Image (cartoon, rainbow, N blue to C red):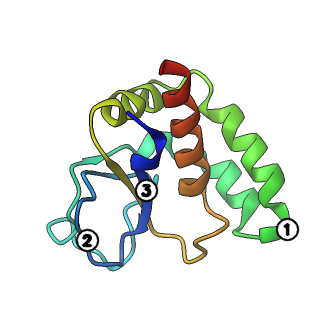
């Protein structure tokens, strides 16, 4: 399965067509969203950055490069990451996140990591 089947979308945006398996990848439930209103198939909260890393990053774009490096290190050996890669092998996957910044967020890094893992299996 090719890595172009991994997409990311804010939880506040309406679902689009062909999003496949929708996975919430935030550690905390998104503010203002009722559980029954979020169209998702699974919540993998432990694949999100640790609370300490999230607080250090503080959504500061100037810290994003270092955040990405540290987050990738946290993902090493993650059973939830392995599970996510297995899901993505057989179908399109949409990673759902709540952050406002669509360029500097953990879901973008996570999508890249999943794509890299999928390419190693081809």
Query: Which of pointers 3 and 1 lies earlier in the amino acid sequence?
Result: 3
In the figure, 7 relative to 93: above or below? below
Q: Identify the residue shown where x is 24% and y is 52%.
A: 20
Query: Which of pointers 3 and 2 lies earlier in the amino acid sequence?
Result: 3
Label ID, residue 7: 3
The picture places residue 57, in percent across and down from the top left corner, at 74, 60
Identify the residue position indicated by label 2 in the image. 15
- For the residue carrying disc 3, how many other residues have a C-alpha within 10 Å: few (<14), some (14-19), or many (20+)? some
The picture places residue 31, in percent across and down from the top left corner, at 39, 75
Q: CA distance from mark 2 to mark 1?
A: 30 Å
Q: CA distance from mark 3 to mark 1?
A: 24 Å
Q: CA distance from mark 3 to mark 2?
A: 12 Å
The picture places residue 61, in percent across and down from the top left corner, at 78, 70
The picture places residue 99, in percent across and down from the top left corner, at 53, 71
Q: Is residue 71 left or right of residue 84?
A: right
Identify the residue position indicated by label 1 in the image. 62
């Amino acid at each position: 399965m090719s890595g172009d089947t991994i997409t990311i979308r804010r939880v506040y945006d309406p679902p689009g067509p062909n999003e496949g398996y929708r996975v919430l990848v935030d550690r905390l439930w998104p503010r203002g969203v009722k559980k029954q209103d979020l169209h998702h198939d699974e919540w993998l909260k432990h694949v999100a950055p640790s609370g300490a890393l999230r607080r250090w990053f503080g959504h500061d774009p100037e810290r994003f490069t270092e955040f990405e490096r540290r987050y990738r290190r946290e993902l090493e050996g993650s059973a939830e990451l392995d599970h996510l890669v297995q899901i993505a092998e057989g179908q399109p996957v949409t990673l759902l996140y709540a952050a406002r910044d669509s360029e500097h967020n953990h879901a973008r890094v996570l999508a890249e990591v999943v794509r890299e893992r999928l390419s190693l299996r081809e």
